[in-house]
Image (tube, rainbow, N blue to C red):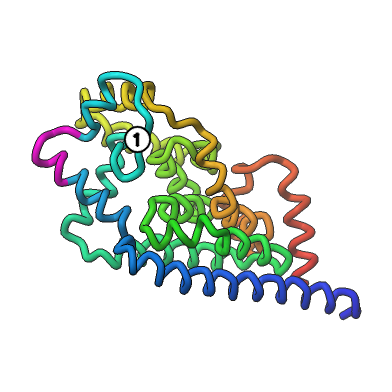
Amino acid sequence: MPRRRRLTRALYASLAAVLAVAAVIEAVLLWDILREQHALGLDLDFFRGISRHWLDTGEFYLPRQLSGPYVVETLVDVLYPPFALYLFLPFLVLPGFLWWAIPITVFSACILWLRPARWSWPLIMLGIAWPQTVSQILYGNTNMWIAAFIAAGLCLWWPSVLVLIKPSLAPFALIGIRRRRWWAALGILALASIPFGSLWLDYAAAVRNSSLGLAHALVTVPLMLAPVWAWLARARPSATALQADALPEAVPDVHDLAIAEVE
């Protein structure tokens, strides 16, 4: 192997390792801070609370969200579409650790299954070490689920439909859109949404009246791109067969470069 290639590989590995260490340090420091504030898993507590409220009253959105313009308050206002309840409700009975274990396992397994080339690992780790990523994982934010849906979508095409539980990140839901089974999954999701009935009108009003724009989603993009980098750098031929038409035509050129780097 040429010396230049060895040095390049060492650089990729070193950058990835530095970012991994940074992520661990961030997590340890934030863990202590959030524990003192009793804020660890606060988002999961919120999702359980709004789920219980819906079961008890049939209300998912607050009256102030439906009555007119309002300034969005974190852990107060609900801006998820009604079918997000399919994700939240099971955790009224499931043990809390699964809220983290399931998406983290899916995310990690999909990236490892793709066997991405070394050049992509610093970019993947950048998304994981991103400060917003670490804090939201400790809070238990749904962004870790969205990242898992994206990763699974890049391996199996249809799970990306589930990204629609967070409409601000809807472009990532288009992964696999050219596959018939993606459309089948979308159809199933649409059918599963019918029982919520007039709650969809409430959702439209809550979104229309809110002060929240799309800019708030930008800080989460590095994590969402992590599985995309893995897909672009994939070395597993079967992944190509599954998703060859899910991204632009320029992708094969990048894929060829990834294969060459691995070899």
Tell me the quarter of the image containing the C terminus: bottom right
Q: Quadrant of residue 102?
A: bottom left
Q: Nearer the viewer, residue 26 or 238?
A: 26
Residue range corresponding to the magenta coloring = 52-59
Residue drawn 9% across the image and 40% down it: 56
Answer with left or right where residue 63 lies relative to residue 240.
left
Q: Residue at x 27, y 33 (%)?
A: 193
Residue at point 82%, 72% (across, down):
8
Between 229 and 216, the one lying in front of the other is 216
Quarter of the image holding residue 14?
bottom right
Question: Is residue 56 covered in magenta?
Answer: yes
Residue 46: x and y in percent read 26, 50
In percent of width and height, residue 109 lies at 48, 67
Q: Is residue 8 above or below residue 243?
A: below
In this rendering, the answer to whether 245 lies above or below 127 is above
Question: 89 left or right of 183?
Answer: left
Residue annotated with mark 1: 79
Q: Mark 1 falls on what kind of element?
A: loop
Q: Nearer the viewer, residue 206 or 174?
A: 206
**In this picture, is 125 found above or below 162?**
below
Q: Main secondary structure of the magenta part?
A: helix
Q: Is residue 247 magenta?
A: no
* Viewer-closest of 128 and 9: 128
Judge left or right: residue 185 versus residue 112.
Answer: left
At label 1, the amino acid type is Leu
Residue placed furthest toward the left: 56
